[in-house]
Amino acid sequence: MHKKNPKGKFIVFEGIDGSGISTQTQRLKSLFESKYGIKAVLAKEPSEGPIGTIIRQVLSDRVIGIDDSCLALLFAADRIDHNNNKIKPVLEQGDFVICDRYLWSTYAYQGMHNDYDWIKEINKFAYKPDLTIFIKVQPETSLKRITKSRFKTEKFEKVDVLGQVMVNYIKLIKEWKDLGEQVVEIDGERDPELVEKEIKTVIEHYFLNKNTQLV
Ligand code: TYD
């Protein structure tokens, strides 16, 4: 059973590498603060905490010899640490957390090489998002963007791997919708400005009344 969230709102962005999540999380934070006067804190997984730091070293091959199940455990441990030390205090204040990747990333990426039920089990105490926004781009688009913006690629940044991750994300959308969870899919192939505009509409629908005040 997932833990019940304290009173703030928890919004998560998901997508394959290069889908533009980081850009959109930052833009949403600005929108919350400038247009609605709502405090929003940005978060990201792997986190900036001690376990997240080890994970980043694994992803960039600076630490080797960590197998797939060990990596899944590291992500789950990082998530609990992140919940306790960053997400929970913000939600308890009644503010918004906007998180760049969360549970679905583990299900979609670590789900490629680990038993799905086991992954769910080791993540069962993590807070559930109030809304998950999936930004959909094709693996080819994603890799084009990644190779344009940096020289070195990381562990999962290959077209066939991202294709498999995408298949897993599509299954998750259906599974969570069937469970009655709040999930929105957005076409990320378009200009960032258009994606941003659609996200604004979604946020107003879920969290604000017609006077753009919190509901
Ligand atoms: P990313 O979020 O793109 O961070 P950066 O922009 O700093 O490179 O990269 C994190 C990688 O970690 C990405 O390939 C997805 C992967 N990941 C998992 O495999 N499982 C997880 O649970 C999370 C949160 C991320």
Image (tube, helix red, strand yellow):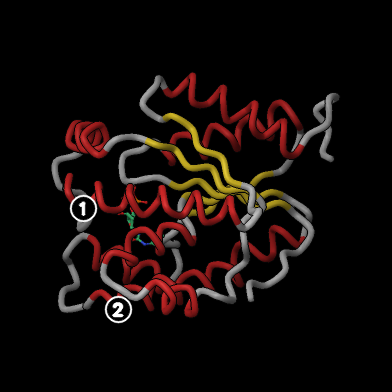
Q: Residues within 10 Å of mark 1 (few under 14, many from 20)?
A: some
Q: Residue 40: name its quadrant.
A: top right
Where is residue 20 shown, x and y percent of the image? 39, 36
Q: What's the residue type where badge 1 is placed?
A: Val
| Label 1 SS | helix
Q: Is residue 203 above or below residue 3?
A: above
Look at 72% across and 64% down and name the residue there. Answer: 5
Q: What's the residue type where badge 2 is placed?
A: Ser
Q: Compare residues 1 and 72 and report the one nearer the observer.
A: 1
Look at 59% across and 54% down and name the residue there. Answer: 178
What residue would you read off at disc 2? 69
Dot placed on the residue nearer the N-terminal end, 2 or 1:
2
Where is residue 4 shown, x and y percent of the image? 72, 69
Where is residue 79 shown, x and y percent of the image? 50, 69
Q: Is residue 170 above or below residue 60?
A: above
The circle on residue 197 is none
What residue would you read off at disc 1? 161
Ligand 1 quadrant assignment: bottom left
Spatial CA span between label 2 and label 1: 17 Å
- Which of the image's four quarters has the C terminus? top right
Look at 41% across and 47% down and name the residue there. Answer: 170
The answer to whether marks 2 and 1 mark residues whose Cβ atoms lie closer than 8 Å is no
| Disc 2 CB within 8 Å of nearest ligand 1 atom | no
Q: Residue 15: name its quadrant.
A: top left
In-image side of 54 versus 41 (left or right): left
| Label 2 SS | helix
